[in-house]
Image (cartoon, grey):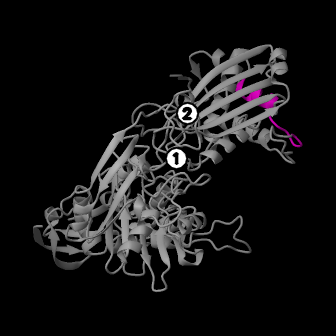
Amino acid sequence: MSSLDMELTVNGRAVKRPAKARMRLLDFLRDELNLTGTKEGCGAGECGTCSVFVDGKLVKSCLMPAAKANGATIETVEGLAKRGGLTYLQQAFHKTGASQCGYCIPGMVMAATGALRENPHAGLDEIKERLGGNICRCTGYSKIFEAVELARDVMNGALPVTALDGPGAGASYIGNNVRRLDAPSKVTGALKYAGDMVMPGMLHMQVLRSPVAHALIKSIDISEAEAMPGVECVITADDVPGEDGFGVFVHDQPIMARGRVRYVGEAIAAVAAVDVETAMAALGKIKVEYENLPAVFDAEAAMASGAPVLHDYAPDNIVKHIPIRKGDVEAGFADAELVVEQSYETQPVEHAYLEPEAGLAYVDHDGVVTVISPSQNITHHRHMLAKIIDRPINKVRFIMSPVGGGFGGKEDMIYQGMLALAAMKSGLPVRLVFTREESIISTAKRHPARITYKMGLKNDGRITAVEFRMISDGGAYGLSTEGVMRKAAILSCGPYDIANVKIDTHGVYTNNTPSGAFRTFGAMQAQFATESHLDICAGKLGLDPFEIRRVNMMRSGASTHTKQKLGSVSLGLALEAAEKASGWESGPSVARGGVRGDLGRAGNREPCTLGARIRTSHDVDTKEDIA
């Protein structure tokens, strides 16, 4: 492979080193100079985690060929402050709590540094505009903007340097604003995530994934890949020595496809080689013969008689059905003065954590198989892996690396088993780092759901009965589906006291990408339907949306439809506070006409409109059109 001689200045030091011709500036900084504070989140210039200064200008290093930086002056997050120190901006990020998972923060610090270098007196709108090329999935940006404004004022002398000092815990950490212990390592880029870690002799893994949704694997020929120079091992399901299966509730998913693939993107084989390029080339030498099978991509169709069966233990493709019954639903509907039926659908949602999946595995001097990864469920993973690789539990170790965003999406043992097998087979450390495309195609999403809602009500808004049915697409494997169905059923009717309910939630196998845990899993889909349905019913009854909720809300001492008695319920206080703080214009939503006067008030989030909005309308007290 051709290379070029690089001569440039990086963080004030002259650097002279060869670089592979295919390298981006990002690769050169990370792989050759070990400056891993510069992250890769997307590889497409969209997220900003790779931001650096090139000759004083902010640049997305994932888009810049290394050759183009030859002779340039480069500044990375590691070079902003003297070793062991923090710039005013980094101190401000620490003070305000602007870093959570921290993966975006080095790039965010670079963009904020650039903003204040360009305009030391930048206002909030300009700060937002200049940071617009950087994405944060955790914080909601408020603390980040607060940090930049704080640093600006300290740098300009409007505030003393002591404004950057953090408050102490006082008598207790509870109730006090205490700075995060890990923030300095995040704002300086010093914290090592799994994809930043290296070991001597480390191999690089690449994974061959299925191009078809449902097929029998007739044969896998890995001989040419194994024979390639630089390839240390190739693994398939045949390399699993123990009980091959993992999952949160049902262990239905093999480490790699075993005789059959069930979704596009499922792992078929993996190569561990001396570098990523060799491993990728070896994937092209693996020959797989498929026999296509009928596939099903709709959850209701999968439940129908004659649908393709994904797993033999579930001939009806039902992962889990949760039924709940309370009272007499038919009598409740008979007593109702209004019955409203409606269907609701939610879509699959990608977690989009900025840190793609990554891990490093090795076998230590005592024969302990060790896996380092941002797993959100390491104890469960350890026990599952011990059975899969047929090792006693004391010979399996999981180390949780810093999690660069998870939201439930790193709860599943999607790739850790492959790393362990490759480390065992090769006898060398093995690292795998997903591309963003690989992360999207192969990992779990929020469960899409189709909900049918039937509600009976009196004219005063009192709910007499509810019939709730949710069908969720669990995808090709079970993962967290059972738990999601339980949560959806338990929370389906919301915080409302309803005498008669009939609830059914169904998690269903399909040939789609598996569905898994995602923040408020199950509850999100159910509450979207419940609260939307209440608004529709309020409109039909001529009631204010707050009023219909007050009529039906649980109060202290109420029992849920799963028979849990609630000692204290604060929903009434929450509704009152929300109504007051929002300046709510009372009355039925459908009877207000085309305008309303409670939008754009001070302290309220701006109404959603298409396009960018820099100026606010907080001082506007006229009525606004409703889109």
Mark 2, other Cα within 10 Å: few <14 / some 14–19 / many ≥20: many
Where 581 sits versus 352, above or below?
above
Q: Is residue 133 visible?
A: no
Q: Is mark 2 on a helix, strand or loop?
A: loop
Front-lying residue, 148 or 110: 110
317 left or right of 333?
left
Where 467 sits versus 203, above or below?
above
Residue 600: mark in rendering: 2
Q: How far apart are marks 2 and 1 (CA)?
A: 46 Å
- What span is colored magenta in the figure? 544-558
Q: In which quarter of the image is residue 614?
A: top left
Please tell me whether residue 553 belongs to the stretch shown in magenta.
yes
Mark 1, other Cα within 10 Å: few <14 / some 14–19 / many ≥20: many
Closer to the chain start, of discs 2 and 1, is 1
Q: Can residue 627 be seen in this view?
A: yes
Q: Quadrant of residue 274?
A: bottom left
Name which residue type carries label 2: Gly
Q: Position of residue 253 (x, y in %)?
A: 51, 52
Q: What element carries label 1?
A: loop
Q: Name the residue under label 1.
A: 477
* Figure quadrant of the N terminus: bottom left
Furthest-right residue in view? 557
Where 560 sits versus 279, above or below?
above
Residue appearing at x 49%, y 48% in the figure: 444
Front-lying residue, 148 or 10: 10
Front-lying residue, 183 or 277: 277
Q: In which quarter of the image is residue 211?
A: top left
